[in-house]
Image (spheres, rainbow, N blue to C red):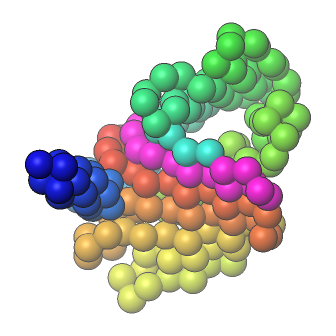
Amino acid sequence: MVAAFLRLGAGALLALLAACSTVPERYAVPAVARETLQSFQIEGRFSLRYEQASYSGKIAWRHAPEGDDIFLMNPFGQGAAEISRRPGVARLVTADQKEFQAADADQLVADVLGYPLPVAGMGEWLLARATPAGAAERDGAGRLLRLQEAGWSIDYDYGDNPSPQALPVRLTARRGEALELKLRIDDWSAQ
């Protein structure tokens, strides 16, 4: 009887792990060209490694020309942090409802959380759009595979979506050896 429970538990664990690693069936292709997109929403998962510490959870991000709203949740969906960015002001609210404000979102995150994250530039990175300052490597379809920009190295994965307009399903951003941010995008809504 114990052996049966162990087999059942092992099977459930394997099914759970397989479910976490699959690419969504619905391809992430916007209705308009990626280069002209102004707004998007994503839902997904993140993992962050900074020096010896690591964090993981869920992410919901709304991006528009007027700013960003980023919600970070623990793996169980409880709020961990909320970051809002508007022209000239950024706000970060922690899980214990402490609120911090600054003029620059990147600096605010670095000051409060203790490590740098490219909040201001990440919207363009999520859309797999290189800026003129970035060094880009592209695949045969013209999609961004790797970007070197502002001290960051960003790698893109489009799953098995062959479209030149595909939006990434995975993104890995590294800053040196000490900092790595991985995003797994489960749902895209782009306009």
Q: Considering only vertical position in the picture, is 125 above or below 79?
A: below
* Residue at 55%, 45% in the rendered image: 56
State the extent of the magenta-drawn residues as a range.
38-54
Q: Quadrant of residue 65?
A: top right
Provide residue 142's location: percent of width, then percent of height: 42, 80
* Residue at 36%, 68% in the rendered image: 158
**Residue closest to the far front:** 1
* Residue at 62%, 45% in the rendered image: 55
Say if the magenta span includes residue 40.
yes
Q: Considering only vertical position in the picture, is 165 above or below 52?
A: below
Q: Considering only vertical position in the picture, is 130 above or below 46?
A: below
| 155 or 180, nearer to the observer | 180
Q: Considering only vertical position in the picture, is 98 above or below 188?
A: above
Majority secondary structure in the magenta region? strand
**Residue closest to the far top:** 97
Say if the magenta span includes residue 31.
no
Provide residue 10's location: percent of width, then percent of height: 24, 57
* Residue at 44%, 61% in the rendered image: 170
In the image, is 154 to the left or to the right of 88? left
Q: Quadrant of residue 157?
A: bottom left
Provide residue 149's location: percent of width, then percent of height: 73, 67
Which quarter shows the C terminus?
top left
Residue 95 visible in the current orientation = yes
How many numbered badges does the structure rendering display? 0
Provide residue 134's location: percent of width, then percent of height: 70, 71
Residue 28 visible in the current orientation = no
